[in-house]
Structures are given as structure tokens and as C-alpha cells.
Image: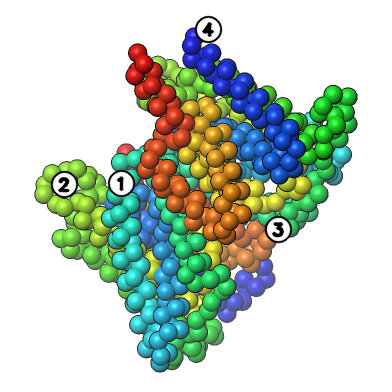
Amino acid sequence: MRRQTVTGVVVSAALFVIAATVPVLGSRYYTFVATDIVIFAMLATSLNLLVGLSGLVSFGHAAYFGVGAYVCGILMKAGGVPFLAAWLLGGVGGALLAGVFGYFCVRLTRVYFSMLTLAFAQIVWAVCFKWNDVTGGEQGYPDVPMPDLAFLDWLPWIGSLRSGDKFYFVVLMLATVSMLAMRRIANSSFGRILTCIRDNLERTQFIGIDVRRHQLVVFTIAGGFAGLAGGLFGIFNRGVFPDFCYWPKSAEVLIMTILGGMYSFWGPSIGAAVLIILNQYIVSRTEYWPLVLGAIMLALLFAFPRGIAGAVGAAWRSRDRFNA
Amino acid sequence: MLELLDSGFVLGQLRSGVTTAIFLFLIASGLSLIFGVLRIINFAHGSLYMIGAYIAWDTTARLPGYGVSFWASVLVAACVVAVLGAVVERCLLRFVYRREEHYQLLFTYALVLIFSDAAKILWGTEAHSVSRPHGLAGSVELGGVRFPTYELVILAIGSMVVIVLWLSLNRTGYGRIIRAAALDREMLGALGTDVSSLYTTMFMAASFLAGLSGALITPIRSVVPGMDVEIIVDAFIVVVIGGLGSLWGTLLGSLVYGMVLAFGIVIFPRFSIFAAFALMALVLIIRPWGLLGRPIR
């Protein structure tokens, strides 16, 4: 194996072990924060398939997150569909919607692409906000049931945990599988072509690659994973609300992705963890979280133009050079 | 739907649509100007509008003699916001001109967060309202419809801004330089124009318009936190429909959007917000550069 691959595997495994030990701390609060982080790490990574990998700055990623949450929540509560099936169908819902919207979006470039993704997301939000019979409208769709986790009871330690901790393990497992799938996609030849398109669209066209089709496929995939993250978040949040699709949510995920580092696979996850922990820390001390967040964003954008992961990576490489 | 057969009702909706359009134009023209020349999508433009509204409310409440003080406070608000805009451009924005779009987007969004909380700290979270200035509280009857006098004044101010903007962009030497900057800033700089001070002036002018519209809207709508993010999305819809960087496009976009809001409520009462976004998406699909814009690069 190449050294880079080894580092990647070691980092991934270390992250997983750290994440899995959170319930050991025995605090409901830590488990709550950790669940939040894992779900948003998954969402931000799915957005990064577009922003970092393919250079498509989507400003409406929350739409697919929200639709996944509604589909999964409604199927589980009104349809009595078992959790795993409802969750997967939530992902399918997100992917289908992204496929339809993406068909139009990938025809545009740069600012116009961002604007169209925003417009579509706002349409989704408006529909969720007003369609009282299905989504519960402005009041949201409350009381999404917790999945039946009795199948975990035979496990030695996990079986004896609180339901919040058990659900955390389910989230962690499903998110890990999704993240590994996304990592596989990013490192595949398909992923390389997307980066090629990002760096030089015309040249990629010249060598005979169907640029739009590649962009549409990645848009659909990203929408699907966003939908999967949404399904988990709806259950975690015990309800789905139109805010899930509103544009500040898209902005929030974009902030996580870019501040964390869009040119690195784990960057968006780091961004999600840093922002959620900061949020928890600051909200308990002052009501002016947006002010602090804005100031931190300005500082980070000036200090680390390539995000936290980019800065750490650069420091790591310069250490190598120093030693050599 | 039957209401559409009543000419009085139609005129009334037309009136409200035009009033909405004027405010949208005042904000969106600044947004469009900044995009056209500085090539920046400025999310914080709605925040400048909100700050204009707060300053106007605050100054009106402090000044004695309401009739004159309203107009004085409108002027104060617009000027203070213009200065604030210049400071933001000088101290922050000029460092991000050469950065990628997503980076600029995030940068101006950080400003939105900071301004919205700063406004909460300075002016609190409760809603404030300003009553209509003296002599303009009544209404005039035209063709069976009552037009509030204040809205007629707004119509006059709006038309004046359109004319002044057009004249200064198309009939003055400075306007020619601005149009040149929109086309090729390096070449303009090479020819000896101070492009960086031109940018500051442009940003100041756009901020002035945002502050002005924020101040002028106070007698019609209450001043509340959150008015910044609400208006910025509307302004984006307008410039996207009309064409980013086009003055007439922005005017057309404002009118179209104003009418969609006014009549959408009648035609599909529950989905009028939906209609606005659908229109934006439709324009982007058919003519991405907007109804009157030109494709860039």
C-alpha cells in the first residue's frame, strides 16, 4: 500500500474508535452532541462531493437533506415502514429530487449554478412550508418514532445502554458505511474525472468526456447521501420541520464544508465537529452565537484560506520536509 | 379569482405591486451594480438595508418635530449606511476580490451574521414602527382607488433614482469609467484610473441606496430582526430574473416580482412564495443571464 493510503486508513480507523467511545463517558449530553456531529459530518461530506471534488458550489443542499428527513419520517410514522427501509427510501427520495433538479442545474456554471440550486431549494422549502396535509406545514411533522432497537439487546455492552446511546451507535454505523461509500466514490476514476472537470472543464470536454452527465450523476449521488443524513436527523430531532430545507441551513453546511477544508475528504467532518462544538460552548455563555460565528468565520477565512484541514495538511507536509 | 374582474381591485393590487417593486429596485440595483462592477455577490446588502431602517427609526424617535425629522432621519440613515459600506469595503472586502466565488459568498455571509447580531445588541429584538410623516398620512383618490399619499411620494423618489442612476451611468464621464471597470478592470487600471477608489465609491453608492430604501420603508413595514435575510433573497430573485449587472433588467425584475407577489396571492393564495421561486428557476433555465442581462464570458 502507498503511504498516503496507510495514513488514510489509520486516520479513518482512529476517528471511528474515538467516535465509538463517546457513550463510555456516560453523559447524555456528550452522546447528543456526538450524534449531531456524526449526522452533520455525513451531510457536509455529501456536499463536498459537489463543492470540493467537482467544483459545483451548491447553495441548496438543505433541500435534499429536508426531503430525506420528510420521506423517512412520514414513512415511519404514518406508513409504519421499518426504520432501515424508510431510511433507505429517504435517501432514494433525496437522490430522485436531486436527479430532476440537477438535470437543469448542471447546464449552468458558477454563479448561475449556485443561484438555480438556491431557487430549487427554496421551492422545496415553500412546498414543505405550505403543504399542511402531508408535511404538517409551518408546524412541522412532530413525533417521528424512534426505531425499534431491540435487535441490539443481545450485544454485551451496547445492549445495556440507554436508547439515546443505542441510537447513536446505529447512526455511527450507518454514517460510517455512507462515509466509506463516499470515500470510495471520491477516490474512484469517476471521482478523478470530476476533479478534472473542476480544474479544467474545456479540456475534459476535449478528451471526449460527457461533462454534464458526470456532474448530474454526482449531483444525484450527493443528494442521495444528503437524504440519508436527513432521515437520521429527523429521528434524532424527533420531528421534521420546514427549516431543514431553508437556505440558512444550506449556508450552514457550506460553512462547515469550506471552513473544515473542501480539498480534503475529512475536512468537512472536521468543520462540522468544530462548528457544532463551538456552537454548544458559546450558546451556553452568550445569546450572540451568530456574532461570534461570523467573527470566527472572518478570522478563519483570512488565516486558513484552504480550511482547517488544508492548514493542518500543509503543516504536516512542511514537517516532513523539515525532517528530510 | 372573480376579484380579477373588478377593476378597482386590480388597480389596488397593481398599486401594491408597484410599491413593492420600488423598494425591491432600490435594494436590488445596488446588489446588481456591485456584481456588475466589483464581481461580488454581496449577501450583506440586505443587512445594510436593515441597518438603514433601524437608524431611521432611532433618529426619528430622537428628533423633535416629526414632519421634518422623518426626512432628516432618512437622509442621516442613508448617509451613515453609505459610510459604513465604505468602511466595510476598505477594511474587509477588498481582500477577497481575487478569491473564488464560494469564498466570497461565505465572507459576505459572515458579515450578515455579524450585522444581524450587532443590530440586536444596539436596538433590541422587539419590532419598531414609524408613523407616516406629517402631511403624507392621508390618501388621494384616483380612478376609484385610494392611493396613500406616502406611496405616491415613494413612487416619485423611486422614479427619480432610476433616472439619476441611468443618467450618471450613461451620460457622465464617471459613468463611462464605471462601465469600463465592469468590462476590464486591469485595462482600466493600466490606463491610469484609480480602480480601487472607484470600487469604494461604487460600494458606497450601493450602500446609500440600501440604507435609503431601509429608511423609506419604515412607515410601511415594522423594523424587526430578520428583515435582512428576508429582503436579500427577494433581491436575489429580482436581479436573477432581470439579469445580474443590468440596470433596466433590475427595474423589470422588480416590477415582475412585485406583480407576482401582488397577483400571486389572488391566483394561488397558498403558494404565492412558491410562484416567485418558480419564476426565478424558470428564468435561470431558459435565460440564465436574465431577461435583459448579457451572458458573461
| Label 1 chain ID | B
Query: With respect to residue A278, does B202 lie above or below?
Result: below
Mark pair 3, 2: CA separation: 52 Å
Circle nearer the viewer, 1 or 4: 4
Q: Amino acid at mark 2?
A: Gly
Query: With respect to residue A179, does A29 lie above or below?
Result: below
Q: Position of residue A77 (x, y in %)?
A: 83, 44
> Does residue A297 show up?
yes
Locate residue B4 relative to residue A319 in the image: left or right: right
Query: With respect to residue A218, does A188 lie above or below?
Result: above
Circle nearer the viewer, 2 or 1: 1
Circle nearer the viewer, 4 or 3: 4
Residue B76 or A132: which is nearer the viewer?
A: B76
Query: With respect to residue A170, does A239 lie above or below?
Result: below
Q: Residue at x 87, y 39 (%)?
A: A80
Label 1 residue SS: helix
Mark pair 4, 2: CA separation: 53 Å
Q: Amino acid at mark 3?
A: Glu
- Verify CB contact (< 8 Å) between mark 3 and mark 1: no
Mark pair 2, 1: CA separation: 17 Å
Q: Which quadrant, please, contains the N terminus of chain B?
A: bottom right
Label 3 residue SS: helix
Circle nearer the viewer, 4 or 2: 4
Q: Which residue is mark 3?
A: A138
Name the quadrant containing residue A305. Answer: top left
Confirm whether circles 4 and 3 share one chain.
yes
Q: Residue at x 41, y 48 (%)?
A: A298
Circle nearer the viewer, 3 or 1: 1
Q: Which residue is mark 2?
A: B189
Confirm whether circles 1 and 4 share one chain.
no
- Verify CB contact (< 8 Å) between mark 4 and mark 2: no
Mark pair 1, 4: CA separation: 42 Å
